[in-house]
Image (cartoon, helix red, strand yellow):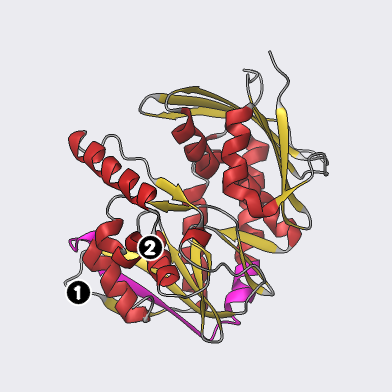
Amino acid sequence: MAPAQRETFAFLPGLHLEVRGDKRTQAHFRAEYRAARVDPGAEADLVVSFGRTSSRSPGFEAGYRSLRWRVALDPLGDGPLRATIDLRGAPRSFGLSLLQGYVVEPLLGLLAPAAGHVLLPAAAVASEGGTLLLIGRSRSGKSSLVARAAAAGTAVLGDDHVLVGQDGCRAFPRRLRLYPDVAETAPAALASLPARTRALLRALGFVRAATGGAVAPPVRVPVETLGAVVRDPLPLARVVVLERREVPRLIAEGLSGDELVAAAGGVLREQRRALEGVEDRRWREHLDRVLAEEESLLGETFAQAVAVGRLVVPTGLPAGQAVAAIAAELALGV
């Protein structure tokens, strides 16, 4: 067996990721985090290895359709946080993307508070006075809103994750996920994509329809394909929570600081759902401690925002109409 290759990515001082695995694994993470890539061998805070796992290590098993994986976690200690992932099944490229979101980034998020930040599952774009931060669960429209904003000339920081700290928001270098419904949710963004990417989205649309949604992978696109990315931190100007509910129309609500922190905490817990399944008391206690640190840090940071609120979107509204309504309310990419 060929020795595992290594890649190292530096997101912040004190927040370095090392990925070990075969060529396909390295190609995936290089494409995702290329702006953060540094020389291999730099000291890492999180080491993720793709390969065989030990059944004696604490961890968990999960899967999605034809893919299965087992994650083994080394005991918590003073050195780097270490995880080994055994991914099986096909398509492997989709499995790597799932594990990036389900395992690698949640583990990375556990280390961010020690670096003075929260790795928050949220979108962010440049706005008057700083950053507009959009907090919402998966499929709330964040990626489509960022795509619309980028295509309209607004600089962006991220569509799915950003780093939030006392200095405001920082970009987290990750590819944008686009689905075939981008034709309805962000038509100008679709028009600005290369012809090959548009053709791939159309093909995936046919596959999704033919399988009744059972096969529905996204197309991963560098955000720079659509517009400018802000690499330096920007102060927090506005924070908006996106939520879908059974309501007759789009509703804009005010939020208290405590409610805003609770909403962010809920998104963080949802992201770490798999990690909460680890049958190890020390791990569960560690997750609770980190969340408390994050909520404290977010409370201090959100207090700097000029405006905070929540947009409640009707659940029955089609995706294209829902994203257009949010964009109009926020004057984003319109």
Name the residue at 32% across, 64% down. 186
Which of these two is toward me, 164 or 56?
164
Numbered circle sitting on residue 192: 2
Label 1 vs label 2, nearer the camera: 2
Label 1: how many residues lie within 10 Å, few (<14), some (14-19) or many (20+)?
some
What segment carries the magenta color? 297-319
Residue 35: image location, x then y, percent: 65, 55
Can residue 314 be seen in the rendering of this structure?
no
Which of these two is toward me, 104 or 125?
125
Residue found at the very far top of the displayed protein: 1
Above or below, comparing residue 305 to residue 242 in the picture: below
Residue found at the very far front of the displayed protein: 195
The span from disc 1 to disc 2 (Cα, nearest Å) is: 31 Å
Q: Amino acid at mark 2?
A: Ser
Residue 152: image location, x then y, percent: 40, 74
Label 1 belongs to which residue? 249
Q: Amino acid at mark 1?
A: Arg
Give the image quarter of residue 66: top left
Above or below, comparing residue 186 to residue 177 in the picture: below
Report whether 326 appears left or right of 317.
Answer: right
Is residue 302 rendered magenta in the image?
A: yes
Numbered circle sitting on residue 270: none
Is residue 303 rendered magenta in the image?
A: yes
Counting every numbered tag in the picture gives 2
SS of the residue under disc 1: loop
Which of these two is toward me, 219 or 165?
219
Which of these two is toward me, 30 or 256?
30
Of the residues under marks 1 and 2, which one precedes in the sequence? Answer: 2
Report whether 325 appears left or right of 83.
Answer: left
Above or below, comparing residue 86 to residue 200 in the picture: above
SS of the residue under disc 2: helix
